[in-house]
Amino acid sequence: MELTPTSEDEAFRRAARDWLLANRPAGPAPREGRASRDYATDWLARCHAGGWSGLAWPSDYGGQGLSPERLILWYEEYVRARAPSALDCTFVALNHAGPTVIARGTEAQKAFHLPRILEGRSIWCQGFSEPGAGSDLASLRTTGRVEGDVLVVNGQKIWSSYADIADYQELLIRTEPGSSRHKGLSWVICDMTLPGITVRPIENMAGVTHFAEVFYDDVRIPLDNVVGDLHDGWSVAMTTLAFERRTAALALQLELSVKVEDLIALADAPAGSATAARLADLRAEAAAIRAMTWRTALREPATPFDGSLVRLSFAELAQKVHRAAMDILGPAGLTDGHWSHDYLESYSETIAGGTAEIQRNIIAERVLGLPREPRA
Ligand SMILES: Cc1cc2nc3c(=O)[nH]c(=O)nc-3n(C[C@H](O)[C@H](O)[C@H](O)COP(=O)(O)OP(=O)(O)OC[C@H]3O[C@@H](n4cnc5c(N)ncnc54)[C@H](O)[C@@H]3O)c2cc1C
């Protein structure tokens, strides 16, 4: 694997750096609600005007068609410039809903949704998880009954990030009566303003309402909104999850090194002290995550399950870094709004996008070739 940047790569990196430094918004992003949406969509609109939105999307659909190398170069500059979190409310649309519509949607769906996403005019959320169907997504029970040219949807989703401020939801429901597990599901574009939808925000332990429960009470969704074939939603959902896993943590993984350097500066630990040794370990581990990120992105042929190795290592290191920050800050950590907030949020790293146990199962079965766990 060749990691020496070409002169074109260096020129790209400089262009990204210059643009980000000139255009990143001043001041912190609001953490929730309408204000967070306005902040994120303004930033995306500015990125779009500057030619920096839809970075990995094909150019035929308005994207920049960047290679994996260039995408990482962009995110390295992005986190260095301390640009707004790449995991804001535009994330779902840009990183997995939009790409799923590109891969599996109709021309009408593409023509309507893709420009709106790229320009920051529509926000999407994901409605996959249900109470009782998280790690085991195939046990989901929300139904869609075909009635003429609509699906009548009833049920409940949970943990739907940004559902309270989203325009559309990528919704996975059971549409074939009597079906079970992976069969008989459909992936549907749900307009969040439809009658019968109730969104109930959930406050997390950091005191922020990022996600919500969503209830569907005879919600009538046009059959034209099905992406892929009716009853073939599992394969569409796998497309979505593949996009999500490819990009979800890229910026966060690279940002961890920046956070460790911030912590080292904050700690100002004397050379040879136990704190200095602890920070040195964290710096080395963050460098390893960066190397794994590059390796996973550039490996040919692509080995999708390697993503679980990086994801798990990143999630556990993120928790260690924030734990160290709280130890170093001591009582000041209780009033510091930045590190204490991120510390509490870091607990979700080993849950969101597949729990640590599920990642370990994937690594055991798909990477190490150990026996599969017994199925019920
Ligand atoms: C910050 C955050 C944002 C999220 N955003 C969204 C979103 O936008 N849309 C959405 O649909 N969902 C979202 N989720 C939900 C997320 O996908 C689920 O929380 C996750 O898949 C785990 O499902 P669960 O919470 O139902 O836990 P469960 O699946 O019930 O797991 C409970 C415990 O059992 C363990 N476990 C389960 N199965 C196994 C097994 N086979 N082997 C070993 N251990 C096992 C798990 O590791 C976990 O420790 C989000 C979650 C978080 C934390």
Image (cartoon, rainbow, N blue to C red):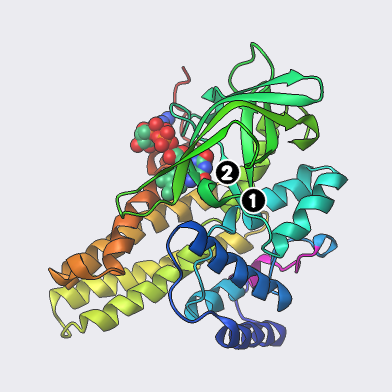
Q: Secondary structure at mark 2?
A: strand
Count the labels in the image. 2
Q: Nearer the viewer, residue 263 or 21?
A: 21
The answer to whether mark 1 and mark 2 are in CB contact below 8 A is yes
Within the magenta stretch, is there residue 177?
no
Assess whether residue 68 is covered by the magenta stretch: yes
Instruction: Indicate if the residue with disc 1 has its beta carbon within 8 Å of ligand 1.
Output: no
Does residue 99 appear anywhere in the picture?
Answer: yes
What is the number of the mark on residue 371? none
Direction from residue 52 to residue 80 in the image, left or right? left
Q: Which residue is mark 1?
A: 96
- Camera-side mark, 1 or 2: 2
Q: Position of residue 20 (x, y in %)?
A: 58, 82
Mark 1 secondary-structure assignment:
helix
Residue range in magenta is: 62-72
Q: Position of residue 251 (x, y in %)?
A: 51, 66
157 vs 37, nearest the viewer:
37
Up the image or down, 52 lies above or below 368; here it is below
Beta carbon at label 2 within 8 Å of ligand 1: yes
Quarter of the render that holds ligand 1? top left
**Residue under numbered circle 2:** 126
Q: Please state the horizontal and vertical placement of residue 6, each as a whole percent of the image.
A: 68, 83
Q: Residue at x 62, y 36 (%)?
A: 171
